[in-house]
Image (spheres, rainbow, N blue to C red):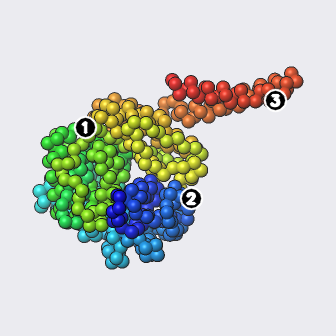
Amino acid sequence: MGSEPPVFRKVLIANRGEIALRVMRACRDLGIPSVAVYSSVDRAAPHVRMAQEAHEIGPAPASESYLRIDRLLDVARKSGAEAIHPGYGFLAENAEFAQACEEAGVVFIGPPATAMRAMGDKVSARELMARAGVPVVPGSAAFRGEPGDAHAAVEPVGYPLMIKAAAGGGGKGMRVVERPYELERSLERARSEAKASFGDETVYFERFLRRPRHIEVQVLFDREGRGVAIGERECSIQRRHQKLVEETPSPVVDTDTRARIGEWALAAAAAVGYVNAGTVEFLRDEDGSFYFMEMNTRLQVEHPVTEEVYGIDLVSGQIRVAAGERLPFSQEQLVPRGHAIECRLTAEDPEHNFLPCPGRIEAVRIPSGPGIRDDSAVAPGYTIPVHYDPMVAKLIAHGADRSESIPRMRRALDEYRLEGLTTNIPFLRRLMDHPAFIAGDLHTGFLDQYGEGLLASEPDGDLDEVALLAAAIHSYRRRVESALEHGQSQSATNGSQWLRLGRMRALRGQR
């Protein structure tokens, strides 16, 4: 930045984990001191260790800490932070939080509350998009009636259909209904989940597309209404509507299609007076048709693949735009270069229905080499808490094209080690080898179709390490016993088996 003053004197990061570290690094690049917050269980978390300033905001449950608007604003006031970056999750798409920041005189690094509210209600957003000329999946109005009345409401939609929570997101409050007799029971379940997750049981009905691809467009707007579409991301590899792997560009999007869906995304954001970074999400049907699904009014988990391919820093862009600066680039300057894939690494056990597996990390080995980026919040001795999302890292591979980025991702997954923790890394390794994935034959039901074949049929490499260690210990004990029987000193046998174990590991790595 040279002698330029920072755009803000101080920024509070209202989040935790890898996204808190990501925002912290962007602030440091801009010369801005940052403030971290943490719950009692996160006192020794990596984002707290890296922070220049950190404040405890409550007990472990998010409802008593990271979701407490009053405590976050109190820390902003005490620390002198001029702005708050919400990251993603927690309060990132909470219009009340954005409004409270504005009323407190603190800049919210995200869209205005009005835009959040407009896109937060999925039924109103669909209607707004249709008026803006953005194609939407055929569907119904909001439904609040009795289950028995739903049959008439879905008649124009037809079967199969999807029930969706009007205030929803993240796959909550969603049910696929194949036949009329399933409708009432599925509706009750969807409403119950929507009520528990969002405090609103309102739903709507939408035509269910059999094998759609989930393709989203990244947008960035400044305060003067200038906006750019920064390419698309393929996010079709999902489990229960939660993304596992994302990539850009999509294998099925050419230059003309990219321009067309980019125009729709810009129109969608402009229709609600959008400012800052956001993502307009589409479903692509098998016939090539695109339909608006929703807009995420925040930074996305998968933003690094866009950064790698377009050579920009989206978080820095967010901060600069929030400070009133103009967009630093035009649409014509945004040209994709190469291909990037991101894998979400989670503390889950795919062999047991992706059961969350929080625990203590004993040792860490982060992959490196050409085209590899790791956005993580892991450290030896750190215990992954049970209270929050199980994602612990994002691994990104960038190559000249998809055929180069896939092998790089496979190699990086082979190198990654989080000892002491059960993760989905072996599952992701097998996914990178799957013929349909390599061919780019993707859809949102990919894991439903192929998931069983991606489960382990042989021990994971970590278990191999344990077996080698056990064998070395057993051999060492036998040699000691034999030496003692023959009157040799124990020191004569010391170390040889550990050296042999090291050689065995080296040979194993060469296979």
Q: Residue at x 47, y 34 (%)?
A: 414
Q: CA distance from mark 3 to mark 2?
A: 41 Å
Q: From this viewpoint, is residue 216 visible? A: yes
Q: Residue at x 43, y 48 (%)?
A: 375
Type of the residue with mark 3: Gln
Report the residue marked by disc 3.
490
Q: Quadrant of residue 168?
A: bottom left
| Residue in front for this viewpoint, 141 or 107 | 107
Q: From this viewpoint, is residue 160 visible? A: no
Q: Residue 353: give x, y in percent of width and height.
A: 46, 44
| Residue in front for this viewpoint, 305 or 241 | 305
Report the residue marked by disc 2.
44
Q: In the image, which is nearer the foreground, mark 3 or mark 1?
A: 3
Q: CA distance from mark 3 to mark 1?
A: 62 Å
Instruction: Report helix, strand or loop for mark 2.
Output: loop
Horizontally, is 70 left or right of 303 in the view?
A: right
The mark nearer the N terminus, 3 or 2, is: 2
Horizontally, is 140 left or right of 5 in the view?
A: left
Q: Residue at x 76, y 30 (%)?
A: 494
* Label number found at residue 379: none
Type of the residue with mark 2: Ala
Type of the residue with mark 1: Pro
Instruction: Report helix, strand or loop for mark 1.
Output: loop
| Residue in front for this viewpoint, 311 or 306 | 311
